[in-house]
Image (cartoon, rainbow, N blue to C red):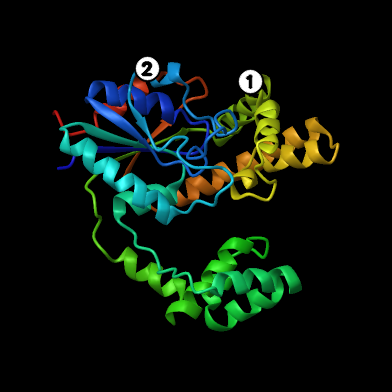
Amino acid sequence: MEKIICVAGPTASGKTRLAVELAKKYDGEVLSCDSMQIYCGMEIGTAAPTISEMQGVPHHMIGVADPKADFSVGKYVELAEPILQDILSRGKTCVVCGGTGLYADSLLLGRTFAPCPSTGVREKLEAEVNHTGIEPVLARLKAVDPESAARLHPSDRRRIIRALEVYLETGETISKHNRKTKLLPPKHDAVWLGLSFEDRQDLYDRIDLRVEKMLKAGLLDEIRALLSSGVPPTATAMQAIGYKEFVDALTNSGDIAAAAALVQQRSRNYAKRQLTWLRRNEQIHWILQPREPDFSAVFQQACANIPFFA
């Protein structure tokens, strides 16, 4: 069995500490699977682990991308897979940690991606959306891939364009492609651990508190620095929860307190979506914490599910 542990769970559930302690116990290194921690200069708003929190454990795939540039799950797997293989080749344990379920699934389960050749189709679709809005493109998608059209919210411009692009480029819907990849056996044999709380409200309270701590830690200054460095407000990185809302407030003389409340609300909604995604994975061993977590109990329960050195 490959020595791979995946620590998953919603935001603010305590993944970072558990991943570090597991890496220390099992002679490992941490491989982040967070779609926003990959960007440079966004440590506060993405809750990236600090040097102190890392406790000397090597961490990978944090701060490796320019926030001015787009980043995709395909690019993540392209960069992360060789790192995972290198960690294992040195006899170490790879502790994959993060809340982006799509990244973890794509890396460990080996989900493949519909081809995306640079033929100009995406650019044409983006230009069409800029000119006519998303509805005509969504209507075209509905005609060829009603499953994806029904699943995607009209505000999800990027995924709507991507779904139609895949059909126009390959003649196969992204829905059909995804179904086929899910039938494939997992690429890596990993132990999956899921962290959350017995009472959902306790998780939500921790999320609200985390946003307050981020502001005290200098999140607004971090955002100002990104904007001053030339990162456009429209960049994918700046669409992350905790950035978009404050960018809007800072650039439009908005109410910071109202923006903070919106970040808290959207973060709670995001946590709910994370849990929905993760619960599809029947391999996850869930560790549900009380309002005041007992880390020693969490750690003991996690180790009980890891067979490497049993």
10 Å crowding of disc 1: few (<14), some (14-19), many (20+): few
Vertical side of 230 occupied by 13: above or below = above
Tell which of 93 and 264 is nearer to you. Answer: 93
Vertical side of 243 occupied by 48: above or below = above
Choose top left, top right, bottom left or bottom right for residue 258.
top right
Drawn side of residue 142 relative to residue 261, left or right: left
Tell which of 170 and 266 is nearer to you. Answer: 170
Residue topped by disc 2: 55
Tell which of 164 and 306 is nearer to you. Answer: 164
Residue topped by disc 1: 217
Residue 300 lies, in percent from the top left, at: 29, 23
Q: Secondary structure at mark 1?
A: helix
Residue name at image x 59 percent, y 67 percent: 160
Choose top left, top right, bottom left or bottom right for residue 310.
top left
Quarter the N terminus occupies: top left
Residue name at image x 22 percent, y 32 percent: 93
Under mark 1, the amino acid is Ala
Q: Secondary structure at mark 2?
A: loop
Residue 278 lies, in percent from the top left, at: 43, 48
Q: In this orientation, does residue 199 appear?
A: yes
